[in-house]
């Protein structure tokens, strides 16, 4: 499956050569990269704002920034978590279309459609977060009631928890599970089809390659689903089963941090399974991206 996904990326992403009329950055403006950028932006919001603020709050056990900042950081938390989940769903949909219908992929999935979809998705996440906090009495300053100074807590109501579980756990989780399972099945079928058309002299070698590809796909699929479910099931399960849920309860803090860590696991998984991602990170960290020679880098070698 990974080989097929990387092959599709080879089709949709052009190599960067100095004599191209368009810049190297322009060549990377593809629907798939845009969806990955959305996921990275959501994870970046989580790492830059949500995690540091929660670390400070856990250490000091108090909130010094006022009610407005409490509402803002809560909105950022919900938006980044929701956007991260649905970006993963969009990536799964994009990869399913690329694998199931590669000939019509460029017409079915365009850059403008991806931009419009992401704008609608982020707008929906923002609107939902505002409505969610409003119905849980934590949006307007007049709604927020603090039992003591320095408190930033959201008391979640049962109906809103059920709606949140459906929209931001069951729906995306089921979609990801179904799509990646279909991708794995299609990858196996395509591998068998390729093996069937090979001549007799390459049949034995190609059979070993196909088996290794399927094993790699199974491992990748298992890791992605396991990490996703491990990070999110405890939070939503505890929210549904608990009689009353507040963002300062011990279980909520523990399981919410587990969900936050999912944003940290995403780049780690990309680094493990995608060689081109590791190469890109090395170019950025070592500042080689500012060198002219970086424009001729080949992130997708043909032997991958």
Image (cartoon, grey):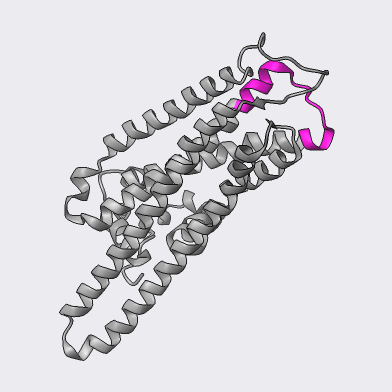
**Of 184 and 264, the residue lying toward us:** 184
Magenta part of the chain: 57-74
Residue occupying image coordinates x 80% and y 22%: 150
Place of residue 277 in the rendered image (x, y in percent of width and height, measured from the top left): 46, 57
Q: Is residue 136 magenta?
A: no
Residue occupying image coordinates x 78% and y 23%: 151
> In the shown orientation, is residue 85 left or right of residue 189?
right
Q: Quadrant of the rendered structure where residue 209 is?
A: bottom left
Place of residue 23 in the rendered image (x, y in percent of width and height, measured from the top left): 32, 44
* Image quadrant occupied by the N terminus: bottom left
Q: Is residue 257 visible?
A: yes
Q: Residue furthest top?
A: 142
Q: Residue furthest bottom?
A: 201
Q: State whether residue 107 is above or below residue 205.
A: above
Q: State whether residue 70 is above or below residue 41.
A: above
Residue occupying image coordinates x 53% and y 58%: 226
* Image quadrant occupied by the C terminus: bottom left
**Of 11 and 151, the residue lying toward us:** 151
């Amino acid at each position: 499956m990974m080989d097929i996904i990387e092959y599709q990326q080879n089709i949709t992403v052009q190599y960067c050569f100095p004599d191209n009329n368009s810049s190297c950055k322009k060549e990377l403006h593809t629907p798939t990269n845009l969806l990955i950028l959305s996921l990275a932006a959501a994870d970046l919001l989580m790492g830059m704002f949500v995690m540091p603020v929660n670390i400070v709050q856990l250490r000091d056990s108090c909130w010094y920034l006022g009610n407005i900042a409490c509402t803002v950081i809560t909105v950022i938390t919900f938006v980044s978590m929701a956007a991260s989940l649905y970006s993963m769903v969009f990536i799964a949909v994009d990869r399913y279309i690329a694998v199931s219908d590669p000939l019509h992929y460029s017409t079915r999935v365009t850059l403008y459609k991806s931009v419009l979809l992401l704008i609608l998705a982020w707008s929906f996440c923002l609107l939902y977060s505002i409505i969610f906090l409003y119905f849980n009495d934590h949006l307007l300053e007049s709604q927020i009631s603090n039992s003591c100074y320095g408190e930033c807590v959201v008391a979640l109501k049962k109906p809103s928890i059920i709606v949140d579980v459906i929209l931001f756990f069951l729906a995306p989780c089921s979609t990801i599970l179904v799509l990646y399972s279909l991708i794995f099945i299609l990858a196996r079928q395509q591998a068998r089809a390729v093996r069937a058309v090979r001549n007799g002299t390459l049949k034995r070698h190609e059979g070993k390659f196909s088996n290794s590809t399927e094993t790699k796909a199974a491992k990748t699929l298992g890791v992605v689903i396991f990490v996703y479910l491990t990070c999110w099931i405890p939070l939503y399960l505890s929210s549904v089963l608990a009689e009353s849920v507040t963002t300062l309860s011990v279980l909520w803090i523990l399981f919410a941090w587990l969900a936050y860590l999912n944003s940290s696991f995403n780049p780690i998984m990309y680094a493990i399974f995608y060689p081109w991602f590791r190469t890109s990170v090395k170019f950025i960290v070592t500042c080689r991206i500012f060198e002219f020679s970086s424009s001729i880098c080949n992130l997708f070698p043909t032997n991958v």
